[in-house]
Image (cartoon, helix red, strand yellow):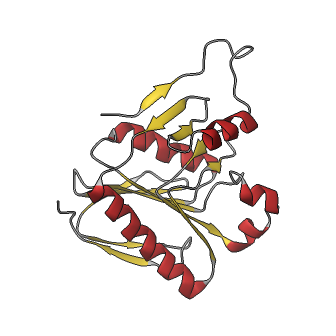
Amino acid sequence: MTALTLPLKVDLKHVHLTDEQFYQLCISNPDLNIERSAVGTLIFMSPVGGDSGSRELELGIDLGIWNRKTMLGKVFSSSTMFKLPNGGSRSPDAAWIELSRWQALTPEQRQKFPPIAPDFVIELRSRTDDLATLQEKMQEYLESGVRLGWLFNPQEQQVEIYRQGQEKEIRTLPTQLSGEAVLPGFELQVEPFTD
């Protein structure tokens, strides 16, 4: 099953969700995982299964442990929605924002959907995810200012690395990933995914 998308291209004079309306839609429907693309398309995502949920948490734990040691920023779970500068509202599987950028937000901005692009994002493809849709999402992140992103694809035993101003790099697992200048000192050994 793939994500259901609802394009809001009917007549934008009559159908258009403001940022506040989108926020209220999400808050009023906590059981739905809803994102919004940069062009206003609502995207309803299905829950992930046990394997994907476990892998997602493990990746977030690795990022969180590194951040606790360095205290360079803030780590966010897949439940966090970011209001991106390009107009999209997205929830990466894990994200990180450099501390001074996070602290520049007001308390109200931090409590709602933070109006900021993370510096780093992780996306993990589940069995129900369409790869092309996730690749478009990664491009949207880059266009919004994300500096580094990793898209894990267990079905192909690969990881795609997205960097500002560069072509994506595809690596076969196992591989050693580096946080590069974005996450200094963060190294992640990624073994092949098993069921």
Q: Residue 79: tell me if it is visible.
A: yes
What residue is rendered at 67% in x and 12% in y? Answer: 11
Residue that extends furthest to the left in the rendered view of this protein: 195
Q: Quadrant of residue 146?
A: bottom right
Residue 88 visible in the snapshot = no
Answer left or right for 168 relative to 180. Answer: left
Using residue 59 as the reference point, say whether residue 17 is left or right of it.
Answer: right
Closest to the observer: 180 or 174?
174
Considering the image in quadrants, where does the N terminus appear?
Answer: top left
Is residue 21 shown above or below 122? above
Residue nearest the observer in this picture, 194 or 48: 48
159 vs 59, nearest the viewer: 59
Q: Quadrant of the C terminus?
A: bottom left
State the image quarter where residue 13 is shown.
top right
Instruction: Residue 109 in the image: state x and y as whole percent.
Output: 77, 56
In the displayed orientation, state which residue is furthest to the bottom.
69
Q: Which residue occupies 41% across, 43% down?
A: 134
Tally of numbered discs: 0
What residue is drawn where x is 48% and y is 43%?
A: 137
| Coordinates of residue 77 in the picture (x, y in percent) | 52, 62
> Residue 86: x, y in percent?
66, 41
Residue visible at 27% across and 58% down in the picture: 51
